[in-house]
Image (cartoon, rainbow, N blue to C red):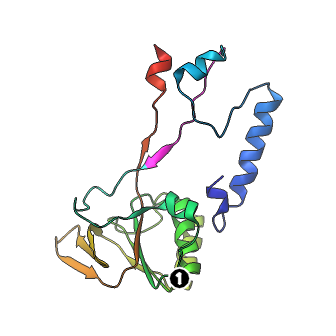
Amino acid sequence: RLDATLPGREEVGAMIDYQLNKAKQYGVSLQLGQRVDASTVMATAPEAVVLATGATLRPPPSLAANADSITAADAYVVRLAPVVRQKRVLFFDMDHSVSAYAVVDLLAQQVDHVVLVTPRTHIAQNVNYCSAIGVHRRLHQARVEIVTGHDLINFQRGTVTVRNVFTDQESEFSAVDEVIYATPRLVIDPLGSKLSS
């Protein structure tokens, strides 16, 4: 549902509604929006259990251990807007999905200057070709500064340090209000091993 709140991602809400309706049609009992443990699940005496526990974004792997706090893209969307209008935000992208660029679209509406940094040689690599053209068009029209081939190294007192993945040359962006990242995910699965035994 979070993804459906982003610019251009409204169709995700319709897909979720369809899946929920189909599950109900086939008699699936859904218990959503609550924390459970293995004993809670087993107390219902289920015939089968499908775990949809989600995932969390990994911290950027090259970020200094003493870096100032940065924000996962999903946490930013939950917050949905900066408390105060920000002047400059850096978005670090290792995800390259449609959802990541929807967050950048949202930032471009809310922030004066967005810098998009990725260690890859170009953006939107996990987006189909036709949709990637749309991503490029929207980001360029919004004047998002796109920096490819750079890794996020540090964020200290408003200064972001990035490193070129080919030359190891470091450069800085100053006066950055916030760093937001989209990275590969880590599965959240505290129940799987407990239920399989």
Percent across and percent down for residue 80 are 59, 67
Question: Does 54 appear in magenta?
Answer: yes
Asked where in the image residue 8 lies, by quadrant, the reply is bottom right
Who's the residue at 66% across and 17% down the image?
44
User: Is residue 157 among the parts visible in the rendering?
Assistant: yes
Left or right placement of residue 183 versus residue 64 in this view: right
In x, y percent, where is residue 68? 30, 67
What residue span does the magenta drawing correspond to?
A: 47-56
Query: Is 176 situated above or below 66?
Result: below
Residue 161 coordinates in the image, percent (x, y): 25, 74
Query: Which residue lies at the image location 32% right of the left edge and 65% below the top edge?
Result: 119
User: In terms of secondary structure, where does tag 1 sit?
Assistant: loop
Residue at the disc numbered 1: 85
Foreground of the two, 36 or 106: 36
Type of residue at label 1? Answer: Arg
* Prevailing secondary structure class for the magenta stretch in the rendered image: loop
The residue nearer to you, when weighing 28 against 85, is 85
User: Does any portion of residue 128 appear in the rendered image?
Assistant: no
Q: Quadrant of residue 29?
A: top right
Q: Is 30 displayed left or right of 151 in the figure?
A: right
Q: Determine whether 153 is above or below 192 in the image.
A: below
Magenta-colored stretch includes residue 35: no
Within 10 Å of disc 1 (Cα), the crowding (few <14, some 14-19, many 20+) is: few
Q: Is residue 96 above or below residue 142?
A: above
